[in-house]
Amino acid sequence: MGTESNVLNKKGHNPLHFFQENKLFKKFLEHIELIAALFSGLLILITWSLESVLSQPMWVILHIVAFTIGGYAKAKEGITETIRTKQLNVEMLMIFAAIGSVAIGYWTEGAILIFIFALSGALETYSMNKSNKAISSLMEMQPEEAILLEDGTEKTVPVSSLTIGDQILVRAGERIPADGVIVKGSSAIDESAITGESMPLNKYNNNEVYASTVALDGTITVSITKKPTETLFQKIIDMVQSAQEEKSPSQLFIERFESTYVNVVLITVAIMLFLPYLIFDWALSESIYRALVLLVVASPCALVASITPATLSAISNAARKGVLFKGGIHVENLSHINAIALDKTGTLTNGKPEVTDAYFANNDHKDYVMAVVGAIENESTHPLAQAITAYSEKELDGKATIEVHDMKNVSGNGVTAFVDEKKWEIGKPDFVGKAEAENFLDGVASKLAAEGKTVVFAKMEGTIVAVFALKDTVRNSTKKAISKLKKHGIHPVMLTGDNELTAKAVAKEAGIDDYIANCLPQEKVEHVKDLRKKYGNIAMVGDGINDAPALASANVGIAMGEGTDVALETADIVLMKNNLERITNSITLSSRMNRIVKQNIVFSLSVIVVLILTNYLQLLDLPLGVIGHEGSTILVILNGLRLLK
């Protein structure tokens, strides 16, 4: 048997392999704390409903199982944290309250107490796990290997081994492994990983390139200028990590409140154990009984329930309308924002270029020219080429049958091809002839460029026959969304890596008065921090990898649903339907939730105070204490559930 097992293991058939690789099992482990809390609640419900038919030992056993399953994670956390910090915490208070409840015969109340607290803790853990995935998503964008050029030979090496001055080869379609300068070749570079802009940039000798950007259509040789650990992309990772580790003022306040609450309750319980017996001539059994009742009624069960059901209801309500909140704290914070920073590409705009204008030297030949240009560009993978092809097919109501011969890509400039034995050139002004391009149709290209549009010329047999203007168009929902934000008293600011001309045109079209152009990722973070100083609480809306640090630095980070995985993981809120108007709806929902939470907290604290006072005056028996304590919990839960509507 041992030999057979060894053989299986040598062949790679590890007995644990199924569990290690099974996605469902991994998901189970990831959410085990939440599953345990929900199972504990289900077990409590079953035990309570079958109380009349269960034997006493079985009834007790089921409660012990519910206690163990639901409370294990929070109990372990509480005990570990107490040992580490040498301070008691709310987790320990809940354990003491549950034990006290059991000690005076109220098993179900103790189990419910543990269940509610375990559920809130599980949701917090789930939110943290989702947030941590942002870092791993970023890591996956980094190439692990590079082609090092040494003495005219190519050698594949780990990126981590590269040093400043090394020369590496990057072929078309590959990600650039490290920051550097082009020393040979040229290519259109997709820098959306860094700038978030959809338009590739044409780069030549002495132009800088960045790690994790993509060389689209040309092979380049790059001289490394920064260590792999100091690249711009690595700085993005570090900024996301740093921003996620920062605690908000509300988090710090809650931590201080919890510590004070625990100490006050436990000191009061300790006093109640003996002081009434020694000073007021209470019987020792009465004094101990009152102290245990105090431990139960003073437990923050209703306080926890004041927030969790209301938060879950608000999150569920928003989810039905296409807005995903990653935690209750973000629902709370959203209504406090005074300004909102918005990325341009993919947020205010659709994120891809579209043909907005087309002019032809001879309108009689318009369809033929459009068909030829569309057919030639159809053989290119460049985003501008794809946009022109899509425009041609739309205008001609289908793809034209054009035979294209000897199509060649002139990296960073355009393309050439032969159709009907005539040479066609399609590309930027310099490629087709700058002087002729500037004079085409009385300088229409200059007018289009002034509107922040990219111009592409088509030339046949030495004569320009058409010019196409392309632009990343503003979303249909953008104008309404900006107008609504202004009505809510929220100041919108556009942040973009694009140039001043394009930024100004888009901001004007969207109705935004304040914008900042030419922003690199680290600069976006600085602008977000400046806005926080000026306006207090701000939100950041974005969709790209480059937006991740700014999303994490804002009080509330909002990602578009079509955005990159990193943006989605880093953000606190995701607009699943990419509708910016949903932000204002969510702000209203946030205000409602905060109002209901305040009502619940005031009510639950008032009930706790009344229960403590009446217990001290010996007017409160345990059954009434339980009714008051659990009744207040039920009421605040029902009040919170109003947010489902």
Image: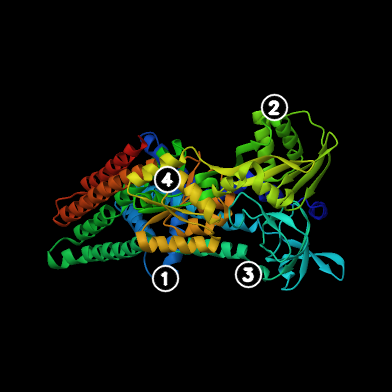
Image: 207 above or below 56: below
Circle 1 sits on which residue?
85
Q: Looking at numbered disc 3 in the image, what kind of residue is underneath it?
A: Glu
CA gap, disc 1 to disc 2?
Answer: 70 Å
Disc nearest the viewer among 3 and 1: 3
The kind of secondary structure element at disc 3 is helix
Q: Which of 618 and 31 is in front in this view?
A: 31
Circle 2 sits on which residue?
398
Q: Residue at x 50, y 48 (%)?
A: 505
Circle 3 sits on which residue?
230
Mark 1 surroundings: few (<14), some (14-19) or many (≥20) residues within 10 A: few
Instruction: Report x, y in % for residue 73.
Output: 47, 55
Q: Which residue is drawn at 21% across and 45% down?
A: 624
Q: Looking at numbered disc 2 in the image, what kind of residue is underneath it?
A: Gly
Mark 4 surroundings: few (<14), some (14-19) or many (≥20) residues within 10 A: some
Give the colour scheme of this rendering: rainbow
CA gap, disc 2 to disc 4?
Answer: 36 Å
Mark 2 surroundings: few (<14), some (14-19) or many (≥20) residues within 10 A: few
Q: Earlier in the sequence, mark 3 or mark 2?
A: 3
The kind of secondary structure element at disc 2 is loop
Q: Nearer the viewer, residue 623 or 598?
A: 598
The kind of secondary structure element at disc 1 is helix
Circle 4 sits on which residue?
511
Q: Looking at numbered disc 1 in the image, what kind of residue is underneath it?
A: Thr
Instruction: Report x, y in % for residue 184.
Output: 78, 64
Disc nearest the viewer among 4 and 1: 4
Q: Which of marks 4 and 3 is nearer the N terminus?
A: 3
